Image: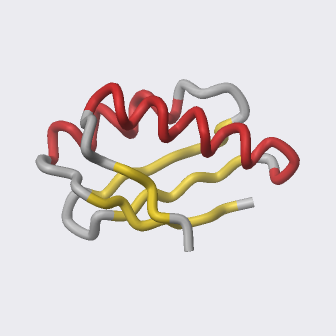
Amino acid sequence: MKKTFTLDEVDCANCAAKMEVAINKIEGVSSATVSFMTQKLTIEADEKDFDKILKAAQKAIRKIEPDCRIVID
């Protein structure tokens, strides 16, 4: 399953790249991309683990950029 989320408060491209690397290391993530220009996060992962992966992704993002959050519609 592939989902795209808006990111709030990504301040620089370097931080976005670090976030992408960290999220790709989360168990169960097939692929993840973070775009600084569009402020978007795309995660591809198994549907049954998606909630757990999303929580882990938010935690990883906060370590890099404390003010950044994933906007869940």
Residue ID at (54%, 25%): 25
Residue ID at (20%, 65%): 37
Residue situated furthest front in the rendering: 67
Residue 6 placement, left or right of 49: left
Residue ID at (68%, 26%): 27
Q: Give the image location of residue 30, x and y in percent.
A: 66, 41
On the image, which quarter does residue 28 sit in? top right
Residue 26 placement, left or right of 67: right
The coloring applied to the image is: secondary structure
Residue situated furthest left in the rendering: 12
Residue situated furthest right in the rendering: 48
On the image, which quarter does residue 9 sit in? bottom left
Residue situated furthest bottom in the rendering: 73
Q: Is residue 7 above or below residue 73?
A: above
Q: Give the image location of residue 46, x and y in percent.
A: 80, 47
On the image, which quarter does residue 54 sit in? top right
**Which sits in the foreground, 48 or 25?**
48
- Looking at the rendering, in which quadrant would you find the C terminus? bottom right
Residue ID at (13%, 50%): 11
Residue 28 placement, left or right of 3: right
Q: Give the image location of residue 1, x and y in percent.
A: 75, 60
Q: Give the image location of residue 58, x and y in percent.
A: 48, 40
Number of numbered tags placed on the structure image = 0
Q: Is residue 53 above or below residue 48?
A: above
